Amino acid sequence: MAKATGIVRIINATRYSWQGLCSAFRYEAAFRQEVMLALVLIPLALWLEVEAWQRVAMIGVLLLLMVVELLNTAVEAVVDRIGSEHHELAGRAKDTGSAAVMVTMLIVALVWGQAIWGLLCSAP
């Protein structure tokens, strides 16, 4: 079967991406929690009187967190698909994916903390 090209390829890629988002939302509690966090914090970032670059950073790190969670979910799914028996490399892969999510959460906390601190320190 020939691969799709042009607009058909774009439509198919969009459909597969949407399926991936829906799957992550349906089966991954952490992803649902991060989506809910973004639904609260993105409007807050738009409402706060911060500089444009801070607003972009505040929203960007939330989106980055979701991207890293999606990648972590993909790694876990592949590892689980390969086999259920314990293997050191499988455990290392899962732990490393989880660590990537944790580091991204720290980045979220730093960016948001800096923005909020800046607001509090500049208040009259």
Image (cartoon, grey):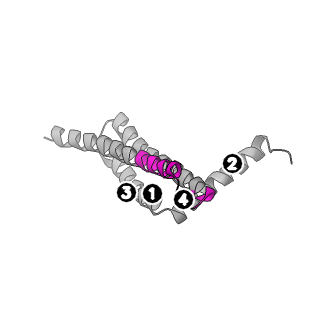
Residue 74 screen position, x and y as percent: 56, 52
Rendered residue at 72%/49% (across/down):
11
The residue indicated by pointer 3 is: 40
Q: Secondary structure at mark 3?
A: helix
Q: Which residues are magenta?
A: 80-101
Q: CA distance from mark 4 to mark 3?
A: 19 Å
Of tags 1 and 4, which is closer to the observer? Answer: 4
CA–CA distance in space, label 1 to label 4: 10 Å
- List x then y, in percent, for residue 52: 36, 36
Q: Secondary structure at mark 1?
A: helix
Left or right: 124, with 83 as reference point: left
Lower sequence index among marks 3 and 1? 1
Are the two marked residues, 1 and 2, in contact with CB atoms closer than 8 angstroms? no
Residue 53 at x, y percent in the picture: 37, 34
The three-letter amino acid code for the residue at tag 4 is: Ala
Query: Residue at position x 41%, y 60% from top?
Result: 33
Gap between marks 3 and 2 measured at Cα: 29 Å
Under tag 4, what secondary structure?
Answer: helix
Picture disc at residue 89: none
Q: Which residue is mark 1?
A: 35
Q: Amino acid at mark 1?
A: Val
Query: How many numbered discs?
Result: 4
* Numbered mark located on residue 24 in the image: 4
In this view, the residue farthest toward the left is 124
Instruction: Using the rendered view, name the quadrant where residue 83 is placed.
Output: bottom right
Residue identified by numbered label 2? 13
Q: Are marks 3 and 1 in contact (CB under 8 Å)?
A: no
Observer-side mark, 3 or 2, equals 2
Classify 10 Å Cα crowding around label 3: few (below 14), some (14-19), many (20 and above): few
